[in-house]
Amino acid sequence: MCIIVSKNINGSKVLAKNRDRAYKPSLEIVHTIINGVEVVYLRDTITDWSEGMNEYGIGLVNTALMVGYDENEKKIVKKGGKPSKDGRRIRRALSQKKIKDTVNSAITFNGGIKGHTFISTPKRMIAIETTSNHEPKFKLFNEEDVVRTNHGHLHHNAGYTKGKDYLSSKIRKLTAEKLIDDINNLDEILPALRKKFYKKDSNHNLKRDTNKMFTSSQLLLDLENKLFKLTYIENNIDEFVGIRKSFPKGYEPKIKIVVTKVKS
């Protein structure tokens, strides 16, 4: 039940995300080298979910299209399992030097990443839409701002297609589109995605706070300036473990990391 955004700021692309969960995640940031490429990714230590960017200005964010998956994940977590294979898929995709290789890895490696996936450089973004029941479809965006929630666009029968959850998905998408359309400052994006226009526990708010689902963190990737920014909701996570770095001796990282916390 997440929101992902691709936004143009001063001619360069920024990716952003509200991550909603039905359990309190434990989060860490990993800054390391994979296959010779510097990467930074947010990792959920409970489920191994990951997403982030690399030194070549390639970023990746994703939101689910499997109806009920995010809700059922809570049950799987309680049983001690790791419900998603996408963490490993995403980390491999981020270890590529060119966007075409990132896209190819994202759709082929170990069965491919499911859901709505944005893969972007500073100048162009490719949206991929796929589920276990739908083959990958693609759309290229150059200057447009783009928002995806939890209903299909290229596959119209994917994700939520009716009922309250579908209405929520549509309203959250339209609200986010309107908000980001008026933004020209990088620092305004995540606060905008925390704004509430309905009652606190409404399913239509961008920042969720319902019995089933709540926003645990936000991610912003400035691909031009190689900035990785995490904002986590202090009350809605179990723990922020910290930043785990692993580099060869003498290596100077190219990606900057900023971490902030806010209260629910």
Image (cartoon, grey):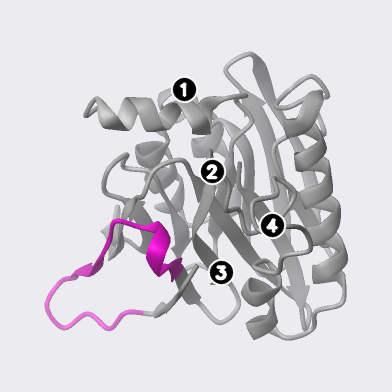
Q: Nearer the viewer, mark 2 or mark 3?
A: 2
Relative image position of residue 39 (x, y in whole percent)? 37, 63
Label 1 vs 3, first from the N-terminus? 1
Relative image position of residue 111 (x, y in whole percent)? 46, 22
Q: How far, Cα to Cα, is label 2 from label 3?
A: 21 Å
Q: Amino acid at mark 4?
A: Leu
Name the foreground residue: 103 vs 135. Answer: 135
Residue 234 is covered by the magenta coloring: yes
Q: How far, Cα to Cα, is label 2 from label 1?
A: 27 Å
Name the foreground residue: 39 vs 241. Answer: 241
Q: Which residue is mark 1?
A: 111
Label drawn at residue 220: 3
Q: Amino acid at mark 2?
A: Met
Q: Quick one: SS at disc 2?
A: loop
Q: Amino acid at mark 3?
A: Leu
Instruction: Specify few, some or many for label 3: CA neighbours under 10 Å numbering under 14, 14-19, or 20 or more.
Output: many
Q: Quick one: SS at disc 1?
A: helix
Q: How far, Cα to Cα, is label 1 from label 3?
A: 27 Å
Q: Nearer the viewer, mark 2 or mark 1?
A: 2
Q: How far, Cα to Cα, is label 1 from label 4?
A: 30 Å
Q: Residue furthest left?
A: 249
Relative image position of residue 10 (x, y in whole percent)? 77, 83
Q: Nearer the viewer, mark 3 or mark 4?
A: 4
Instruction: Please say whether residue 231 is visible from this viewpoint.
Output: yes
Label drawn at residue 206: 4
Instruction: Please say whether residue 155 is visible from this viewpoint.
Output: no
Label 2 vs 3, first from the N-terminus? 2
Label 3 vs 4, first from the N-terminus? 4
Label 1 vs 4, first from the N-terminus? 1
Q: How far, Cα to Cα, is label 4 from label 2?
A: 12 Å
Q: Which residue is mark 2?
A: 213
